[in-house]
Amino acid sequence: MPIQVVLERRPAEIGTWVDETWSAIGVVVGDPAEAHDETEPVHCDDAGVARFIVGGLRLRLFPDECESYYHNLMSPHPRCYVVAHVEGDGERPEPFLVSMSFDEAHAYLEGEDEIYAVDIPPEVHQWTEAFVLSFYAPEKRRKRKREDWAAGERKQS
């Protein structure tokens, strides 16, 4: 599924070492209708907040990640994860991955990449839900049989 990421640039709070902070605040489904310059903001306000759209990304779902998708969708606040390279403090993040899998996003925490959890658009939620229903069946809970630890000690004596 083609995805665009919405980045937001805000003036840094007083007392920080950087002039501005960046974050991913959402994702939008689809390719851009018309080519736009990713360096030009699509929205600015009087407080110095600017929003940019970065396109060219794809959300891909994989059958072996269905358990993670399932748990994400069943959580109280399902999220979409944007993974981005960040060169330095105050620099614009460069998103390179959008995932519905917390496990996949968590793997990138070990490196120097930034992970942003954003709200899921309804189209992505429905698409992921249909995918999970097609490829995933939760394992039935089985009651473990208790082992008699004392019986093993009696045999050794």
Image (cartoon, grey):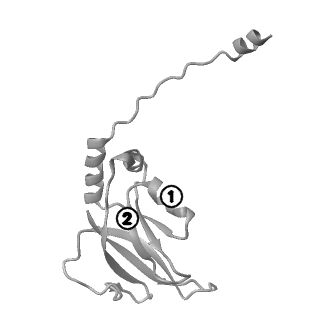
How much space separates mark 1 and mark 2, taking CA atoms? 12 Å
Left or right: where 32 falls relative to 136: left
Residue 106 shows which numbered tag?
A: 1
Seen from the viewer's position, the closer of residues 48 and 104 is: 104
Left or right: where 111 falls relative to 79: right
Residue type (three-letter) at the residue carrying disc 1: His
Helix, strand or loop status at disc 1: helix
Helix, strand or loop status at disc 2: strand
Contact between marks 1 and 2 (CB within 8 A): the answer is no
Identified at 33% across, 84% down, the residue is 38
Seen from the viewer's position, the closer of residues 56 and 124 is: 56
- Relative to 73, say whether 152 is above or below: above
Quadrant of the drawing holding the C terminus:
top right
Residue 35: x and y in percent read 22, 83
Quadrant of the drawing holding the N terminus:
bottom left
Left or right: where 146 falls relative to 122: right
Identified at 26% across, 53% down, the residue is 126
Image quadrant of residue 95?
bottom left
User: Residue at label 2?
Assistant: 98
- Relative to 104, say whether 14 is above or below: below
Residue 154: x and y in percent read 76, 10
- Relative to 28, say whether 132 is above or below: above
Identified at 40% across, 54% down, the residue is 78
In this rendering, the count of numbered labels is 2
Identified at 71% across, 14% down, the residue is 152
Mark 1 crowd level (few <14, some 14–19, many ≥20, 10 Å Cα): few
